[in-house]
Amino acid sequence: MDGQAAAGENPKEQEPVITIREERVTAEEYIDFLKRTDRGSQYPKERFEERVARLVQTVSISLTARNEQGLLVGALFGLTDFAYWLYITDLGVDRDYLRQGIGRRLMQTAHELAGGEKDIAVYLIANENAVPFYEKCGMKRADDVMQYNHIEWTEFTVT
């Protein structure tokens, strides 16, 4: 046969090919991506565009997941010292691409880039809906995190 299913057979639907790589994105592309995720309400309204532009330009680790057409369908930003720790600041996946292993692949790739699990501890702040995902990635809740936060924060959702 020439790659086609025989009569009566249901060919298994193929998962889309997703490429993960280290890459910087523009603020505009990231903001457009946020509209297609559940991450669009995690940022304060104050100086949003300016701060996102600074974010995408300065993080230590910037990973993208793109479909075959080049559309950004996943992103991870992290801060690391490449010796002891990695702090995941942002991890998101396009709603149409959830539950395909993209988030897990982004987490694994970031951990490897930072130095690997033998040397690097991973930290992040998770919203309650994301906790089961992070637990599946092997993470555990921690009580020893300190915070100093006096920023202006007006809630809004990127639309």
Image: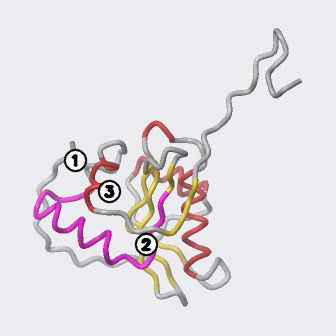
Circle 3 — which element?
helix
Which of the two discs, 3 and 2, labels the residue nearer the N terminus? Answer: 3
Which of the two discs, 3 and 1, labels the residue nearer the N terminus? Answer: 3
Residue on which disc 2 sits: 78
Identity of the amino acid at label 3?
A: Tyr
User: Is 35 left, or right, of 14 in this rendering?
Assistant: left
User: Is 57 left, or right, of 14 in this rendering?
Assistant: left
User: Is 153 left, or right, of 22 in this rendering?
Assistant: left
Circle 1 — which element?
loop
Comparing 145 with 81, the one in front is 81
- CA separation in Å, label 2 and label 1: 21 Å
In the figure, residue 159 lies in which quadrant? top left
Residue under the image location 45 percent in, 74 percent down: 61
Q: Is residue 49 magenta?
A: yes
Crowdedness of circle 1 by 10 Å Cα count: few (<14), some, many (20+)? some
Outermost residue, right side: 1
Residue on which disc 3 sits: 30
Q: Which residues are magenta?
A: 42-64
- CA separation in Å, label 3 and label 2: 15 Å
